[in-house]
Amino acid sequence: MEAPSVEEVSKKWAGKVNIVGIAWNGTQGEIDEFISRHGLTVKNVRDGDGEIFASFSVASQPAWVFQSAAGERVVESRALAEDDINSQLSAIASSN
């Protein structure tokens, strides 16, 4: 389950990088329930038609898109451990 890792990482990097969860599957009610159940404070957006995922060439979940302010992007189409997430965010923070 990535939700706890996402929440911890978002707290660690608050004010340094922007983290946004994009939900592709489920109704808004199901997404809201998931957010509530896991106590998430990370901003979440519903991508019901898959337009956001398509714009990042993401075909399935779980997936991560790390993008620097300059637009350089790394896409990981798999679940990531917290250390891997921190490593990617460190690279982004140092390039901004």
Image (cartoon, rainbow, N blue to C red):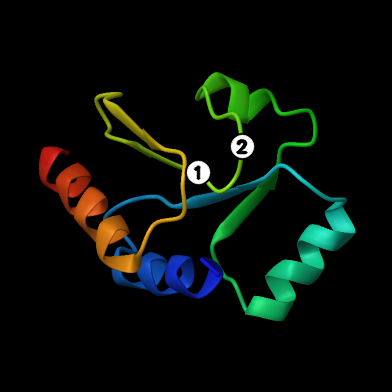
Per the image, the residue denoted by label 1 is 63
**Amino acid carrying mark 2 in the image:** Ser
- Residue 47 x %, y %: 72, 37
Task: Name the quadrant containing residue 46.
Answer: top right
Quadrant location of the N terminus in the rendered image: bottom right
Is residue 63 depicted above or below 90 in this figure? above
Which of 57 and 52 lies nearest the eye of the viewer?
Answer: 57
Query: Is disc 1 surrounded by few (<14), some (14 to 19) or many (20+) residues within 10 Å?
Result: some
> Along the horizontal axis of the image, is 53 left or right of 27?
left
Residue 55, quarter of the rendered image: top right
**Residue, x 71% and y 42% (percent of image)?**
24
Whether residues under marks 1 and 2 lie with C-beta atoms below 8 angstroms apart, the answer is yes
Residue designated by label 2? 60
User: In which quadrant of the rendered view does residue 5 lie?
Assistant: bottom left
Residue 12 marker: none
The C terminus is located in which quarter? top left
Left or right: 35 in relation to 43: right
Q: Position of residue 19 (x, y in %)?
A: 44, 52
Residue that lies at the very extreme toward the left in this rendered image: 94
Up-down relation of residue 49 to residue 83 (above or below): above
Amino acid beneath label 1 = Ala
